[in-house]
Image (cartoon, rainbow, N blue to C red):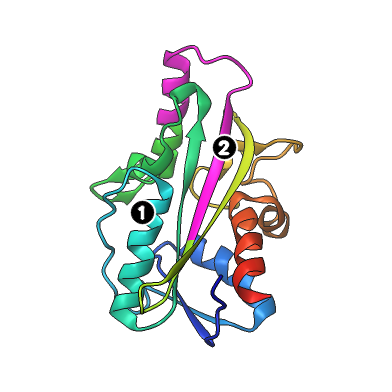
Amino acid sequence: MRRFDGTQLLVATHNAGKLIEISDLLKPFGVSVVSAGALGLPEPVETEDNFVGNARIKAHAAAQASGLIALADDSGICVDGLGGAPGVYTADWAETPNGRDFGMAMERTWRELEAVAAPFPRNAQFCSTLVMAWPDRHDEVFEGKMAGSVVWPMRGALGHGYDPIFQPDGYNETFAEMSPDLKNKISHRADAFRKLVTGCFT
């Protein structure tokens, strides 16, 4: 396992919500964080059909373009009643000609569950894969999950993405109703991040 030995980490994302979550998780290690969006780096085309493959594409593209160690996250919600969809296409379900509309994506998720009369609870998992890539093309991979269920109607105004319809197991609140501190302790990304920290930072 290779250690992180820099002072600045490039987060390979143009997603402001994801950048904030990762920045908060890295605060204890005194690492400054910059996003691919802030550096004006293009978003590479994600051509893989799995989280690991797409995270690798993003991390290596950012590391090669910047010369910095880069961290990429590929994550999504996998709904049991939809055969694991939207999965790697989680963000794609929100795409419109005017940008991403996650309200539309959440409505589609529920509509498709209703169409197949999926049984309750409508189990789902949020999955996160983190890939840290070095400019010499070495990388380390860490995967995390959070089990829960899809609920309707949407609840909460915090978080981002599909958070308003995801209620994690053992809690009565959706991710969008939880304080950021609590979500960052229990989320799929937090699970992957604990493994990253153990492997590369401590």
Depth check: give the residue in front, 37 or 164. 37
Residues shaded magenta = 108-130
Residue 134 visible in image: yes
Q: Residue at 41% of width from left, 35% of height from top? A: 86
Q: Going 64% across and 34% down the picture, which residue do you hit? A: 148
Q: What amino acid is found at the position of numbered circle 1 in the picture?
A: Asn
x and y, in percent, of residue 135 in the image: 36, 79
Q: Quadrant of the N terminus?
A: bottom right
User: Is 60 in front, or is 115?
Assistant: 60
Residue 38 placement: quadrant: bottom left
Q: Taking 92 as reference, is 118 left or right?
A: right
- Please determine whether, in this image, residue 183 is positioned above or below residue 23: above
Which residue is rendered at x = 64% and y = 84% of the image?
A: 30
- Neighbor class of circle 2 (other Cα within 10 Å; few <14, some 14-19, many 20+) is many
Q: CA distance from mark 2 to mark 1?
A: 18 Å
Q: Is residue 177 rendered to the left or right of residue 118?
A: right
Instruction: Give the percent coordinates (x, y) of residue 167.
Output: 65, 36
Residues at badges 2 and 1 in contact (C-beta under 8 Å)? Answer: no
Helix, strand or loop status at disc 2: strand
Is 30 above or below relative to 129?
A: below
Labelled disc at residue 125: 2
The answer to which image quadrant residue 201 occupies is bottom right
View extreme (front): residue: 1
- Looking at the image, which is closer to me, 26 or 161? 26
Q: Tell me the quarter of the picture where residue 170 sits.
A: top right
The residue depicted at 36 percent of the width and 52 percent of the height is 53
Task: Indicate the amino acid at tag 2.
Answer: Gln
Horizontal and vertical percent position of residue 56: 38, 60
Q: Which mark is residue 54?
A: 1
- Provide residue 193's location: percent of width, then percent of height: 61, 61
**Mark 2 or 1 closer to N-term?**
1
